[in-house]
Structure formats: structure tokens, C-alpha cells
Image (spheres, rainbow, N blue to C red):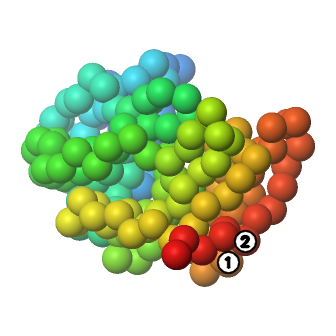
Amino acid sequence: MAQAYGLDRLDHRWNAPIDLATEYVTSGCGDKICVVAYTGGVRVLDPATGRLLWFDPLPAVVGRAGDVLVAQVPGRNSSTQLSVLDPETGRVREQLGEWAVLAPPTGDGELIAMRTDLNTAKAWLARVDPATGGAHYFGVVSGVTGDCEARVGVGAVICRRLDASVGVWRPIPLR
């Protein structure tokens, strides 16, 4: 059971059934409380009352991206299916498709993501805008498994190579 207290007087505000053995609370939901089950599914709570706002049994990860929430559900290979959710209702606003998110969202909500073709061991990198559903491809890396990370502004991508070693790439720009 989770309990909320006011910070000014430490007065008890509310209780909510959160079992930290089977779920965790994520801080990336803006002004909402997201409770994610280790086996999948997310509950979104009102931080003022602890009241359940909505529940979705599918998302494995939910996080804020600008003014919306982005839900990630495991897909094929190492990618995930991305959906843009309304933070108040949980309704899907937009299906973004199959992407592996490489970095936390920028201040305006843009995501750095990739699509991997394991047959060719290439990964195509893009900036994905959850607000519009658009993607701008900016580069490709070769010889990777799809297990990659990036940091906005660094200009490099860190990926696991086919031999399980780790490499750093400056993406080859698309022409």
C-alpha cells in the first residue's frame, strides 16, 4: 500500500494499492503518477487524490514526451510498438509504429529512435515527433544487433555489435 503525505505539514493525504514487489512507480509521467507492472500494464493515478484515472493492460513502459504520454509495448526483435496516449484518459491519439527508443525525449518531446533490420544488421535512426506522428530519418549504422543508446546533442550512438562487443558510431547521414 502506498501512502501520500503533504510536504508542508506531512499530513496524510491518501492511500493507493501499489505492490512494489510486482510493480514500480515511474517519475516520467509529468503531473500524473504512473504505476507500471513488471509483467506489463500501467495504471495512472491522480497525484492529489490517489484516484485511478485510467488503466491499460498492455504498455511495458510509459513516459512523458512533451504534452503527451508515449507507451512502449514489446514488438518484434528489439523494437517496441510506440503509441501516443492522452495523459488524462489513456486513449490512443496516434500509433507511431515499430521503433526502439534510444534516448529520453528532448524538452519539446521529440524522441531519438531507430528501426533495425536484423537480416542486414543495419539500423536506421530518426527523430520521431509524438505530437505529429512524423519521423525524420537522419542516419544509418551498420553491423549492429539493435541494442543501442544515444544522447541528444552528443551526435554518437552506442550499440552492441554482432560479436557482442560494444561500438560507438557517428551515424552515416542519409542522402
Tell me the amino acid under the disc marked 1. Val
The alpha-carbon separation of the residues under discs 2 and 1 comes to: 9 Å
Q: Secondary structure at mark 2?
A: loop
In the rendering, at what x and y percent does residue 70 appear? Answer: 32, 50
- Residue drawn at point x = 62 percent, y = 33 percent: 119
Tell me the amino acid under the disc marked 2. Arg
- Residue drawn at point x = 31 percent, y = 26 percent: 58
Mark 2 or mark 1, which is nearer to you? Answer: 2
- Residue drawn at point x = 76 percent, y = 47 percent: 143
Which residue was labeled with disc 1? 154
Query: How many other residues sit within 10 Å of disc 2, few (<14), some (14-19) or many (≥20)?
Result: few
Q: Is residue 75 positioned above or below 137 on the image?
A: above
In the rendering, at what x and y percent does residue 51 appear? Answer: 16, 38
Which residue was labeled with disc 2? 170
On the question of residue 35 being in view, the answer is no
Instruction: Say left or right for 26 vs 117.
Output: left
